[in-house]
Amino acid sequence: MERFISNGKIRVLAVDDDERMIRALKDILEFKGFKVDLAKDGIEALEKVRQNEFDAVVLDILLPQKNGIDVLKEVVAEKPKLPVVMISGHGTIRLAVESTKLGAYDFLEKPLDAERVIITLKNAVEKYRLERKLDSLIRDSMERYKMIGKSNAIRKIFQIIERAAPTNGRILIQGESGTGKELVAQAIHHLGNRSDGPFMRLNCASIPEELIESELFGYTKGAFTGASADKDGLFKVANNGTLFLDEIADMSLRAQAKVLRAIDEGEIQKVGGAEPEKVDVRVIAATNKNLRPLIQEGRFREDLFYRLNVVTIEIPPLRERKEDIPALLAHYNKLFSEENNVKIRTFSTDALILLVEYNWPGNIRELKNVVEYLVVMSEKELIDQQIAFDAIYRDKGQRRKDYFSYSNATLKKSRENFEREIILNRLAAFNWNISKTAKQLGLDRTNLYKKMARYDIHQH
Ligand SMILES: Nc1ncnc2c1ncn2[C@@H]1O[C@H](COP(=O)(O)OP(=O)(O)OP(=O)(O)O)[C@@H](O)[C@H]1O
Ligand SMILES: [Mg+2]
């Protein structure tokens, strides 16, 4: 059970200087099975919040020592998810409304209605509990599958994985090369009900078209020259497990028709005849191509597309979630230096900036290779910008081509685009620390804030 439900009781801190009222509130809540602690001013309230675990706080707005709004701000800063319900008298309604913008869960008006207080608290705690459960699930699975990243995009993908994994729903994973499609497919398999069953993968792009069918469905002895014995296909081998069809866009139309049948009827037939067999396989497909134009051109079956695409997971390219880059660098730096028994490297600030600003056309796979190269090949412990630059471009003919993306915009617009991109990249490199970013850019903080507002830059 979650640690914030003690003996099944919801723990509430009630804060008000009106002794009579707060006693009455305590009695009602305790009668309803809550566990209630009291504080009579803002300072005491903050002390208690810091030292104890509560599931919710009920907080009056007008308080001696430190008023409720200030207390709210500090609680939100320290325990951002702890639900706070404000109490307002008739003079403080406007403040109460504003408090919800500052992070209060809700507000209640005096005189308090017992029923409303209880419902509001129960809802707040339930929401809190769900949020924390989801957070811890996401953390665990990210840890287990070494999916690094805390960008909104990655967190959303993890939420979809968590939701879809325990079902049998077919999933289509789309993303550029190296974005982590296979990793996502594996995570779904391992988090689902079929994790005891096999996870099989077929890369449709890497085997000749005429072999896909026999790979998927197997063949009977004598079905073609060289078929000297019966052989099971991947659909059979993956029975009760997951079959990952990678690069599905490259599958021949004939094979597509057979896969469709396998999905619809749960039945497969070996090449060369034999009786159809029942199989129970969850299909996950992946592609780095957009399938819709292929459907238009008649190269991909629309009906198969809809069967595969029950749930879509789109993994954005790394350049669209640059805030994940520092964590990925750190992760692979640690991993490869441990594997190779060498000292962990340190990235200089300008090296880090270069690595964040680079567009990573090969996505995480490319980043991983660059870090491995740096760990294995660089003699220096400190990776400076030149070393990082050389590692990125070591095998690329056209240097700097991918460094920045240019367009045919006007000079002013280009300058603005450039400025926006630089600010975003630097913020990502410095983990959204405004002071450090401003200092590095040679701006003061106010100026940086202004530019962020102007370019509509917000932390997710
Ligand atoms: N979020 C992530 N955190 C850490 N490593 C990752 C992450 N996503 C992908 N990787 C690593 O990057 C590499 C590429 O991932 P993966 O093979 O899953 O990508 P892919 O989309 O299937 O690429 P391709 O299209 O080239 O087959 C793998 O080594 C994988 O472990
Ligand atoms: Mg892959």
Image (cartoon, rainbow, N blue to C red):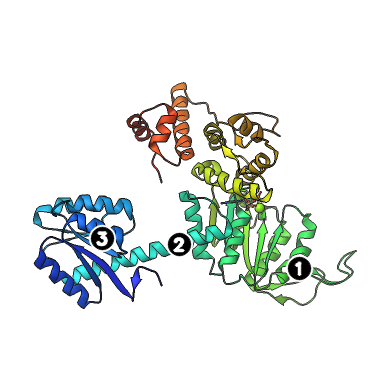
Within the image, what quadrant is residue 199 found in?
bottom right
Q: Position of residue 170 (x, y in %)?
A: 58, 64
Q: Secondary structure at mark 3?
A: helix
Q: Amino acid at mark 2?
A: Ser
Residue depth check, mark 2 versus mark 1: number of the one nearer the observer: 2
Q: Position of residue 267 (x, y in %)?
A: 69, 73
Residue depth check, mark 2 versus mark 3: number of the one nearer the observer: 3
Q: Which residue is mark 3?
A: 48
What is the number of the mark on residue 233?
Answer: 1
Observer able to see residue 136: yes
What is the number of the mark on residue 136?
Answer: 2
Q: Nearer the viewer, residue 92 or 201?
A: 92
* Label 2: few (<14), some (14–19) or many (≥20) C-alpha neighbours in 10 Å: few
Q: Earlier in the sequence, mark 2 or mark 1?
A: 2
Q: Position of residue 434 (x, y in %)?
A: 39, 37
Quick check: marks 2 and 3 in contact, CB under 8 Å? Answer: no
Q: Secondary structure at mark 2?
A: helix
Q: Amino acid at mark 1?
A: Gly
What is the number of the mark on residue 344?
Answer: none
Q: Amino acid at mark 3?
A: Lys
